[in-house]
Amino acid sequence: MKQKEDLNPLLLFVFHLTVSIYSFFMFIPYYFFTLVSRPKEVQYGSEEERSNRVKAHSVLGRHEGPYRAVKATKGLVRSVYPGLDTLPKMFEFAAMRFPHGDCLGTREVISEENEEQSNGKQFKKVVLGKYHWLSYKETLAAATQFGCGLAALGQKPKHNIAIFCETRAEWMLAALACFMQNFTLATFYSTLGGPAIAHGLNETEITHIITSRELLETRLKAILIKVPKLRCIIVVDNTPTPSAGYRSGISVHNMADVLKLGDKAKTANCGQNQPTAADIAVIMYTSGSTGIPKGAMISHSNIMAATTGLAERIPNLCEKDTYIGYLPLAHVLELSAELVCITHGCRIGYSSPQTLSDQSTKIKKGTKGDITILKPTIMAAVPEIMDRIYKNVMAKVEEMNFVQQTLFTLAYYYKLDQLSKGYSTPLCDTLVFRKVRALLGGRVRVLFSGGAPLSAATQRFMNVCFCCSVGQGYGLTETCGAGTVSEVWDYSSGRVGGPLVCCEIKLKDWVEGGYLHNDKPYPRGEIIIGGPNVTMGYFKNRGEQTDFFVDENGQRWFCTGDIGEFHEDGCLKIIDRKKDLVKLQAGEYVSLGKVEAILKNCFLVDNICAYAKSDQTYAIAFMVPNQKQLQALADQYGINGSWEELCNNKVMEELVLKIITEAALAAQLERFEIPRKIYLSPDMWTPEMGLVTDAFKLKRKELEKHYSNEIARMYNGK
């Protein structure tokens, strides 16, 4: 310990001396390089200057809005390129501009093998090779062929066709084919359960479905008897697919056969039914986080407006960029992001959460993950994934020796200070953060986060250690994923940026919750989004149709149910959600989402669900503990046992509850908001379990049902 105390001032001196010498010699070349390489309008300035720069303003000068982006003062933007108002026009234009550029990439599977774990379970591991690419010209030709093949199999324009498949190049190829032939594409998450899939297929009256061999065998085959109108299954895997074992009247084809059929087909209708801007391109089923999945009807013009708004927030987006696609394409965030990339000639390399990194579950030890090979420049992620990266890296920092840990900490806070002043730190980036940045391939320049709030600690960590901009965004399926995205130069945390150029946002008073447009210091209320990106409502007019309305000017609006506040610079902050607000017996309101967002920052928490009942006086929670941290806590108090035994240990429950209570108080939660009892779940919550969506949002009803016994126990059996 004495040595550490002596070493710390020495390290501090050496670090500052090195940085000072480097800064002295590099100041002049850096200054002139910045002057030449950055136009005057993107001289970012200090963090304070950037955060105060006006991003949006109230069109009518009222506190409630509507707020519109500064760059959209002359009207909302509807298309990247004039005259391109449908997806086929956009894609054909991109193929004409970048015919030989890489478009869709798939990594070669060299071998697969089963690896036995210490607990006796078998896990499939893969050895992967290089990425193989389809050019834009080849992708256009294949999409045209596949669409003609679907038409030859009896698919009609303006009729619904389903895609139930994992994220992969064939998903996007099939989608482009459907857009070109004006087939309305109904999308379903690959993790949906049988009843939800059957409900969606029957509601949309599907006759043709595109799927993978694995999902056909494990999910779809069992429910075919419940989908009487289905008669044609197209499997995207180009391996022999057995046609036996299906109910009468169903034919099974693989993608290669449909492509051949499309090449030979000379039907008069193939390609003759081009969509209009008002035609429905996608019926996108939600993840069902609050009940039965709903199908949002998204027109071609909706998608064109949304992608235009999103693209405006990515500086210098061009054919030199590489995007890694691994989030569910059935989610509006991923679909919109990939269509933005296609619009600008970027290449999209496909991956999955199981093969994304060198440490991913399906990657054989010694083999590189997809992100290491692809080295993307643009990436989208949900906060759950980013929080895991943050906690894993910080756990490794804790394992460093004292010298390494001190240097890392010094470099971290030095860079944080320099970023706040608007300066870069090339020496720290190269010497300290290079290995951390390599976890995302080493070339990421823009990282987008959506689907849920991103904690300030995680955002700062990404800014510093991954040496890239982190853009928090806010959007919904009903707004085609577009709402707000923070500017890449705005490093302020806890906010989701200003409205995109394709939409405007206003606040609606929610009196019951106590959120009003005349609140001080900031106007607050329910977030209402309007613009050409607002979708056409729910398929077959669900009861929630009242969430949509059209104003006197003919503009569509959607009531989100989320509560926000607008800051003086026009940035939006999400502060609550109407459906997450529970009134306790004594009359206090508990915001479950707020409690969860704060407690997720606790080192012991991997995931957590807060819960409260109106006939009770306190809140409770069930959480997935961080295995390494919980084990360390058990060792500290001499508690032994298996993972399941530790989670079910009452003493461990009390210790964890004490720690998260301290974390909640430090974050200034009210006493009534803090869970008074807690259950430790030994099982991770995955989309496959049905407890979270593919974007890792909590499915509250499913969690309540799953933990009904624990809820009864924590509420003393009431």
Image (spheres, grey):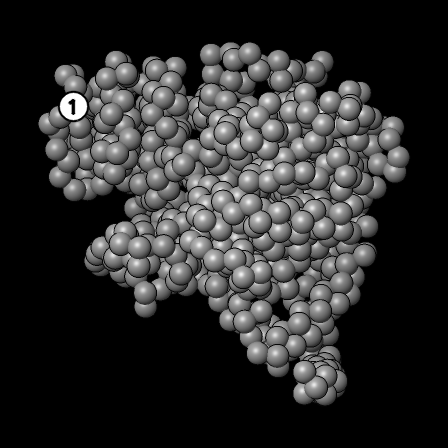
Give above or below for 423 relative to 299.
below
Give above or below for 316 relative to 691.
below
Which residue: 64% across, 78% down?
Answer: 407
Q: Position of residue 196 (x, y in %)?
A: 39, 23
Q: Which residue is mark 1?
A: 246
Q: Position of residue 183 (x, y in %)?
A: 36, 23
Which is nearer the eye, 680 or 426? 680
Q: Position of residue 388 (x, y in %)?
A: 53, 54
Which residue: 57% across, 78% down?
Answer: 401
Q: Position of residue 232 (x, y in %)?
A: 22, 23
- Look at the image and tell me in which quarter the C terminus lies: top right
Left or right: 667 in relation to 353: right
Which residue: 48% across, 36% down?
Answer: 692
Give above or below for 424 relative to 322.
below
Left or right: 70 in relation to 321: right
Give above or below for 260 relative to 226.
below
Is residue 107 visible in the rendered image? The answer is no
Q: Residues within 10 Å of mark 1 (few under 14, many from 20)?
A: some
Left or right: 110 in relation to 342: left
- Look at the image and tell me in which quarter the N terminus lies: bottom right
Q: How many marks?
A: 1
Q: Which element type, helix, strand or loop, lies under badge 1? A: loop
Q: Label 1 sits on what residue type?
A: Tyr
Is residue 599 visible in the rendered image? The answer is yes
Q: Quadrant of residue 204?
A: top left
Which residue: 60% across, 59% down?
Answer: 462
